[in-house]
Image: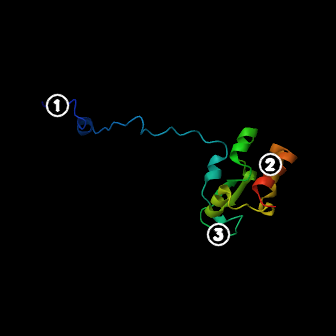
Amino acid sequence: MKRSPLLRKSSLRATTGLQRRSPLRSRPKRQPLEPGEAEWKRKRPGWCECCGHFEWILHGHHVLYLAIVRREGGVLYAPENRMDLCALCHMNMHAGSHKIPMWKVPAAARAFAVELLGEHRAAEFFRRRYAP
């Protein structure tokens, strides 16, 4: 039995140049950016604030983790909560294999944590996640 041109899968592409997209393969809609997010994610060269090596692309590390800032209702991409790290230091920090010494954490980031969490909770956070 011969198939009609309407039933052929390739006929849509051949006649109109259009391709069908599977609903599972459709592109996700882009969410609007948070205030300050574009500047935060901008690639920048510089010196890693942890190991001191020069890198062409530094990673923006949230000193007070993003989930905590979101839970407490703070500004998600506040520049005072940022620390520029190389890829290796950033990966090791989140993997838990390396803790950044507290003296390398910017004073503005410590003040941001105290303002958002309070003195006691900020001290507990830094004690658990950063080296003394």
Q: Please, is residue 88 above or below residue 63 in the view?
A: below
Q: Which residue is mark 3?
A: 54
* Secondary structure found at label 2: helix
* Secondary structure found at label 1: loop
The picture quadrant where one finds residue 49 is: bottom right
Mark 3 or mark 2: name the one nearer the start of the chain.
3
Q: Nearer the viewer, residue 121 or 35?
A: 121
Mark 1 crowdedness (10 Å alpha carbons): few <14, some 14-19, many ≥20? few
Query: Distance of mark 1 from mark 2, alpha carbons?
Result: 68 Å
Q: Which residue is mark 1?
A: 3
Residue visible at 27% across and 38% down in the picture? 13
Mark 3 or mark 1: name the one nearer the start of the chain.
1
Q: Which residue is mark 2?
A: 113
* Secondary structure found at label 3: strand
Tell me the quadrant of the picture where the N terminus can be found: top left
In this rendering, does residue 70 appear at all?
yes
Residue 92: x and y, percent?
65, 60
Mark 1 or mark 2: name the one nearer the start of the chain.
1
Query: Distance of mark 3 from mark 2, alpha carbons?
Result: 27 Å
- Name the side, left or right, on which 15 lies relative to 19: left
Residue visible at 60% across and 62% down in the picture? 57
Q: Nearer the viewer, residue 58 or 98?
A: 98
Amino acid identity at mark 3: Phe
Amino acid identity at mark 2: Ala
Amino acid identity at mark 1: Arg
